[in-house]
Amino acid sequence: MMHGPLLLVVVPLATAVICSVTSMSAKRATPVALLAGLLTHAGLLVAVAIRATRAAGLTYLVGGWAAPVGIVLVVDRFAAVFLILLAVGEVALTVYAIGERTVERSGFAVLLSLLATALSGVIVAGDLFNLFVFVELASVASIGLIALKRRDTGAASGFVYLVYASVSGAFFLIAVVVLYASTGVLTIAEIGAAVDSMPRATVVICSVCFIVSFGVKVGMVPLHFWQASAYDAAGSTAAAFLSGVAMKVYLYAMVRVLWSGLDATGRVPAVAVVLSVAGLLNIVVGHLLALGERDLKRLLAYSSVAHVGYILLGLGSSAGMVGALMHIVMHSLMKTGLFLSCRPIIGHAGSSRIGRLGGAARAQPVAFGAFTIAALAIVGIPPTGGFASKWFVSVAAYADYGAVPVLVVAAGTVISLLYYVRVSIAALAEAVPQPGRVSTTRRAGATALVVVASIAAATLILGPVMTRVEPTLRHAAESVVDRTRYIDLVREPPR
Amino acid sequence: MTTRAYAVAIAAVAAAGLGYVLLSYAVTDGALLPVAARYVTDGVRDTASINIVSGVLLDYRAFDTLGEATVILAAVAAVSALFSGSTIGTDSHGAGLLVQRSVSYLAGFFWLFPVYIIANGHLSPGGGFQGGVSLAVLIVLLNVVFGTRVGSQRIGVKHLHWAESLSAAAFIAIGAVGIVQGGGFLANLSAGFPAGSPGSLISAGAIPLLNLVIGVKVASGLASIFYDLISGDRVAP
Amino acid sequence: MLEVAFVLLLVLLVVTALGAVLIRGYITSIIVLSVFSVVTTVIFAFLQAVDVAMAEAVIGAGLMTAIFVTAVSRTQKVRRDRKERSL
């Protein structure tokens, strides 16, 4: 267990290598290898997360070189939350993809395990350039997953994302150059220790660069244009992982560099305001775009844009880290549930146009039921966990910015209720016989339905249980808001 | 002026501005920053590699290099997924007789260059990455000169995929030696790799091994991307 | 003297960069881009970053040119085929 943080990166990487060998020599073994590798990885993720939460943090020196000279891997309580998210998303997706035979698409197993490698790497990275490497790896693997379906639109959407990701990478690199030039170190904690003596202008430039860079990745509003077409092209399985897990990990990385590294909100209060305003903009624009959308998968993508808004609003409020973290957890579950449950529905209808979903509810009752539960949760109907997280974010935002953000959140809730009800009505309607319709040969397997149903159950249960989970999340939030803890963890590792 | 020219002009001005800002931060008075100074003073002692760049890339920060090599693995997987099921066109005949003849006489010398760069990565500038790319360029050259049929028969896509997977596995295995021997993943001298006498060909512990592995990996990865590009149901160039 | 050469190289860098974007015709543009890489290589060598210079030379001037030319020739073939079919 001493090597825990490292194994989180190496195990899925080895899985990727094994999958690429089996896909050449023994195609049948690929799903087995993928399942075995990623289940082991998920087990490790949970084990490391639990240990890090108990011990208030773990560190690992790669190659035995101490922090500023070599690369350090860090798992604190804040990172542990994301390790759990990754584990849940990974297991759900792997089982689902094997049940639905998505895994047999050429390259899927390799790219999925590489994406798991990259996301674990981003979470455990304690070094700015190491973080950059893993973010780039995540981009390349995501592009592959988006383009995998081999339709012309898939390749084109993958290319659009590639362009956006390059811009994002360039901004990240600029910030790294500036920080390295002004501090001479790349370890995030060492930068955090040196930031107090840094000119304010440097902090501003780097904060802006990081916000733009990760803003592209999470779909902050003027930079969100790639998202709908990418998720549409990606196929529901990959989209579930990209929106449900990968996006959350990018948010984690943004918080890590802005809070632990730069002390951005402390040195430059305007950063908090910028994040909040961007959040409100995301809520408004995302919900309105979703309301006007006629395609189910694009609608879900725009809903993701809106929900990043809630998280950013939480991050921008001085007491909002807990709410943001809660919404990250809830949205990860809900969005994974929505994307995975919409696949059988779309499969039945033969089209993702909302107008053509008629009859799907009757033909796929389990998937539709799960979709409805996840939709109710994401709208924020009280007993579900979605309500609790929105409530925490709203309370924190009210304390800082008054009634306006709360009104925006409320309006967003109403709009999202409207469009999810529209989808449900369309799916509940009688099937309209259409001449040119693709026959519904593709039926959802039992495995997939079990996955979808258990995610829906989890969203339901997390609502009442949220009061029990909240202290853990509060500790996690404290460990990133109080930056000295992270810096001390890296400088004086508990032994 | 066209809109494109305007766009370029705006982009150029923006880039110049950005460059100026960056330079004003990045330019130091010539004194080395603390970590860099440590690399320069203790690098040879810590890594036994007299090429400090290799020492940093393959010892102090070898984990980054593993990540970068994995990016290539991901790119190859993505590209080959896009082109899966298509085969290499075989109607390209390559260059004229004169070029083919002279290249076939020179080919032996061409191979020497990347081999030298990889083998001496810990002694002189270069290393697995640069050597691997020049190997890939050589494979491209063979395909251009002798035609894709001859080229892809000599060095097939299958071979490249195998070479890439195995070298990725070897990279992880070399790293794992550090776990077994103590010193941590990707540790070099502290994991018991022999330091040798710095400056000689057999020295610097695991660094020459890593150079070799990276060279094979980069070469096979990039060459297989090229093969994917020229494959497809349509004829090759 | 060396400083003058360095400034000239920098100017050449900007010129080739602009050229690669502004020139019509993909192949010409790609060739100019490879010249850009060569200039970058020399600049890196000037700055005593020989390792980076070597990487830039083999990637920028070597491999990238080959991959770009292949991609362009393939897409142009597709375009020509489509045109013939539509006629």
Image (cartoon, coloured by chain):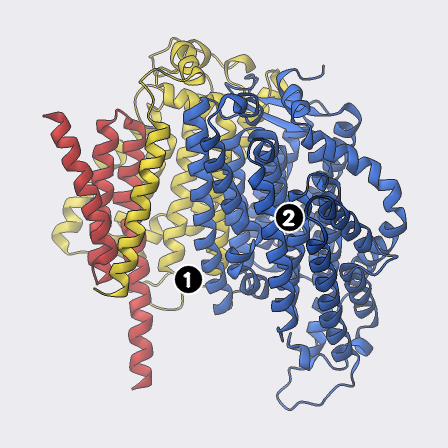
Chain colours: A blue, B yellow, C red
According to the picture, the residue beneath numbered tag 1 turns out to be: B87
Quadrant that contains the N terminus of chain A: top right
According to the picture, the residue beneath numbered tag 2 turns out to be: A312
Q: Secondary structure at mark 2?
A: helix
Q: Residues within 10 Å of mark 2 (few under 14, many from 20)?
A: many
Instruction: Using the rendered image, report if marks 2 and 1 lie on a common chain.
Output: no
x, y percent for residue B173:
56, 29
Quadrant that contains the C terminus of chain A: top right
* Label 2 chain ID: A
- Give the alpha-carbon distance from disc 2 to disc 1, as whole Å: 48 Å
What amino acid is at disc 2? Leu
Query: Does residue B67 show up?
Result: yes
- Splitting the image into 4 quarters, where does residue C55 fall? top left
Q: Is residue A492 left or right of residue A427?
A: left
What amino acid is at disc 1? Thr
Q: Is residue A347 left or right of residue A274?
A: right
| Observer-nearest of B141 and A365 | A365
x, y percent for residue A263:
58, 31
Query: Does residue A13 show up?
Result: no
